[in-house]
Amino acid sequence: LDKKVRQNNLEEGNFINYKKMSENLAIVRSRLNRPLTFAEKILYSHLDDPHGQEIERGVSYLKLRPDRVACQDATAQMAILQFISAGMPQVANPTTVHCDHLIEAQVGGVKDLERAVSINKEVYDFLSSACAKYNIGFWKPGSGIIHQIILENYAFPGGLLIGTDSHTPNAGGLGMCAIGVGGADAVDVMANLPWELKAPKVIGVKLTGAMSGWTAPKDVILKVAGILTVKGGTGAIVEYFGPGVDTISATGMGTICNMGAEIGATTSLFPFNQQMQDYLNATKRKEIGDFARSYAKELRADEGAEYDQVIEINLSELEPHINGPFTPDLATPISKFSEAVKANGWPEELKVGLIGSCTNSSYEDMTRAASIARDALNHGLKAKSAFVVTPGSEQIRATIARDGQLKTFEEFGGIVLANACGPCIGQWDRRDVKKGEANSIISSYNRNFTGRNDGNPATHSFVTSPDLVVAMSIAGTLHFNPLTDKLKDKDGNEFMLAPPSGDGLPAAGYDPGQNTYQPPPKDRATVSVQVSPSSDRLQILSPFNAWDGKDALSCPILIKAQGKTTTDHISMAGPWLKYRGHLDNISNNMLIGAINAANGEANKVKNQTTGTWDAVPTVARDYKAKGIKWVVIGDWNYGEGSSREHAALEPRHLGGLAIITRSFARIHETNLKKQGMLPLTFSDPADYDKIQPDDKVDILCTELAVGKPVTMRVHPANGGSPFEVKLSHTFNEAQIEWFKNGSALNTMAKNAKH
Ligand code: F3S
């Protein structure tokens, strides 16, 4: 284990540290004294403090040291802007950025890419220059989808990766523990803070038998999603084991892990095996495969390891599935699908079939799909539905161009889009149906929420394997079952499609295609980060002011929010996403979805200095301009939903001091602390009702100390006598420093200087 093996072929100084991992594991083992699951082994071998860390699944918060960080272009913007504001010369841990989310599908790969490069020029210029400056690997637009590039280049067995995208778990196909996070978490690791994760529970999925015929790896996760539902994996890692595991290709395992995001799982992973070693060999990483072999006993679960729940699936009996519409856990086996279409009145005609995406873009997927298309062509048939291919990476595109599958798809009537997310993330200028028109589409993607693909709420979007997408596209109807139904060839003779056949790995090796990677230059000091001062999409962040050391007196309540206040209410998505690199512009959505207890309305609050009613961000800006600190009063579980860091940055930017609630969603609470705000909770939740929206409050910040409540003095607007309420908090010593210095990043910058 003493060998020096590089994490990948692109970076010089980053090594795989099995030695350290096994030492950490030995420490944890001696403490826990029980067999461990594979997921636990990876997490515990990456503990910041293996001796002292409290470890209880589902309870403790683990402080971890991930091996890598990956960001996609949409989420990277604010992550990097925040990192810059910490004032560090380079990232502390290996990081890559991938341009895949901002490319709109319109007419086809080459033209769409050209257009995207010009529309998003300022974002790409910023990301590429910032990556060069801070020692981050940059994958240009056209390189492919983040998770495919990670699997091809960066994933390694036993590693811990965090990525600012929900489908980061894709790397579980190579035995990596890969977890999707918000930008604030990525910034922590880039800046060398330990990363916190609630110790996940572990769900075991035992696979037996082997797949054949029309059944594909995708069907495993479609089935699991049906069993566990979209909430069933929350707070848990899904770990596959059993003899069936060795029958699935590494990329097939990637597909299964990828879509584990749809059941809310923290991540999914497979134990190291020969299939992974074969994939590592094929992607020119033989040394990593050999190294993993020497550490193999720690790259699977211990004998007798206990799972919190076990599901068993016999692959030999697994039927192809189609999930949807509108939700990925509505699982229907193909034998029952036609019935379900009728019973539910789903539109029968299949308008569009789409293959590819980060979920299903492997060489195996493409060769199997092409074998079905070729079978149809041999019978004189083409796709009846529109047919769309999004290759997951430039390497996959170039390889299937060389080996003929791409030509088959084109002959079949397919249009080949850029190597990017495209229609999967709604970057699809779809023109064949009008908005509001009910219609059906089927894809090999992972997510099918209402409106996700084309913005049309009446589009019924189904997800399945690429094989079934191709078969259904030939028939043009949702009633077709290729396992039992016949088609008519060009002469009217009946025939059945042959089951798909494909190669797990290209016999002639992968063709890397065009070079789309920009390594950080040796001389980074001279690089300057490009942000136009007139940009409306990007804005350099200035560090927030440090605390003035005083109690805050006579603060107005910007809004007393009632009921659910999620991160979507606090910082809406949709059209606002365009501004996610521009804090001042995106702050115009602050709390516009929250319901004001004063009038039951959204985005209408009283400006306490003028008496006029106005939009929430407008009033906040007015207070800020007048030098008045304000607070928010919130209800239960304030900030639930996502880890979106904008929901914490915006109130801080617009002059907020404290968010006082009955309770917080934990991630949002931590995010507020990181930005230098005070998340406080009523020690007696009933006190929420004692506060009126027009009251003024004093927050006695000077009392802030670990484990001690903070006093809030309330001055009732109705002239009643002032009274005090106690506010609890969860600040520890280090976090109190964040508040005092103005933010976690200010604290890091300060420490870096000393
Ligand atoms: Fe992109 Fe869709 Fe995957 S948005 S990262 S292809 S889930």
Image (tube, helix red, strand yellow):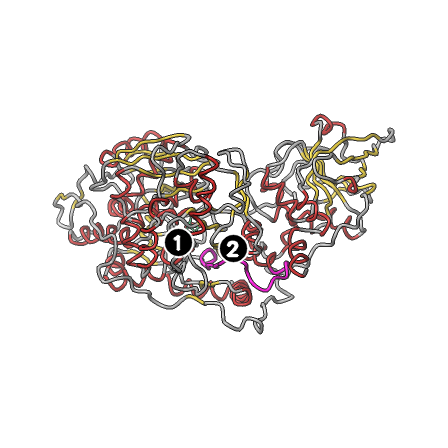
Q: Which residue is mark 1?
A: 155
663 versus 257 height, above or below: above
Residue type beneath disc 1: Ala
Q: Is residue 299 visible?
A: yes
Q: How would you classify the magenta stretch by its main secondary structure?
A: loop
Horizontal relation, residue 751 to residue 440: left or right: right
Task: Tell me which corner region of the image, top left, top right, bottom left or bottom right, holds residue 324.
Answer: top left
Report the residue at 42% width, 52% height from top. 19
Secondary structure beneath dot 1 equals loop
Q: Is mark 2 within 8 Å of ligand 1?
A: no
Residue 352: mark in rendering: none
Q: Nearer the viewer, residue 172 or 277?
A: 277
Horizontal relation, residue 600 to residue 368: left or right: right
- Which one is closest to the eye, mark 1 or mark 2? 1
Q: Which residue is mark 2?
A: 74
Residue range highlighted in magenta: 84-103
Q: Nearer the viewer, residue 107 or 737?
A: 737
Q: Is residue 351 visible?
A: no
Horizontal relation, residue 478 to residue 579: left or right: left
